[in-house]
């Protein structure tokens, strides 16, 4: 039973070590992100202009 517990402990430690070494990188194209931000800003300004015209 003692050998089984040490084997399980080893597997748990090994799994934790291997999972800690995994890195996921997601890259967003800068041009696409900037274009999307510009579009959002334009929409917000249009809403503000429409709101001010209604007053």
Image (cartoon, grey):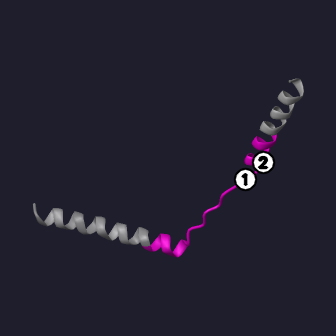
On-image quarter of the N terminus: top right
User: Mark 1 sits on what residue?
Assistant: 22
Q: Secondary structure at mark 2?
A: helix
> Dot 2: within a 10 Å radius of its alpha carbon, few (fewer than 14), some, or many (20 or more) residues?
few
Task: Point out the residue furthest to the right here.
Answer: 3
Range drawn in magenta: 14-35
Give the side of residue 9 with respect to residue 52, left or right.
right
Q: Are marks 2 and 1 in contact (CB under 8 Å)?
A: yes
40 or 53: nearer the viewer: 40
**What residue appears at the point 74 percent right and 46 percent down from the top-left corner?**
20
Give the side of residue 51 with respect to residue 32, left or right.
left
**What residue appears at the point 56 percent right and 72 percent down from the top-left corner?**
29
18 or 47: nearer the viewer: 18
Give the side of residue 47 with respect to residue 8, left or right.
left
**What residue appears at the point 44 percent right and 74 percent down from the top-left corner?**
35
User: Mark 2 sits on what residue?
Assistant: 18
Q: Residue 24, percent across and down?
A: 66, 58
> Dot 1: within a 10 Å radius of its alpha carbon, few (fewer than 14), some, or many (20 or more) residues?
few
| Picture quadrant of residue 27 | bottom right
The mark found on residue 43 in the picture is none
Task: Point out the residue furthest to the left here.
Answer: 55
């Amino acid at each position: 039973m003692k050998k089984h517990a040490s084997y399980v402990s080893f597997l748990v430690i090994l799994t934790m070590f291997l999972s800690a070494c995994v890195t996921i990188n997601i890259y967003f194209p800068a041009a696409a992100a900037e274009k999307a931000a510009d579009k959002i800003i334009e929409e917000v300004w249009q809403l503000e202009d429409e709101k001010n015209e209604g007053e």
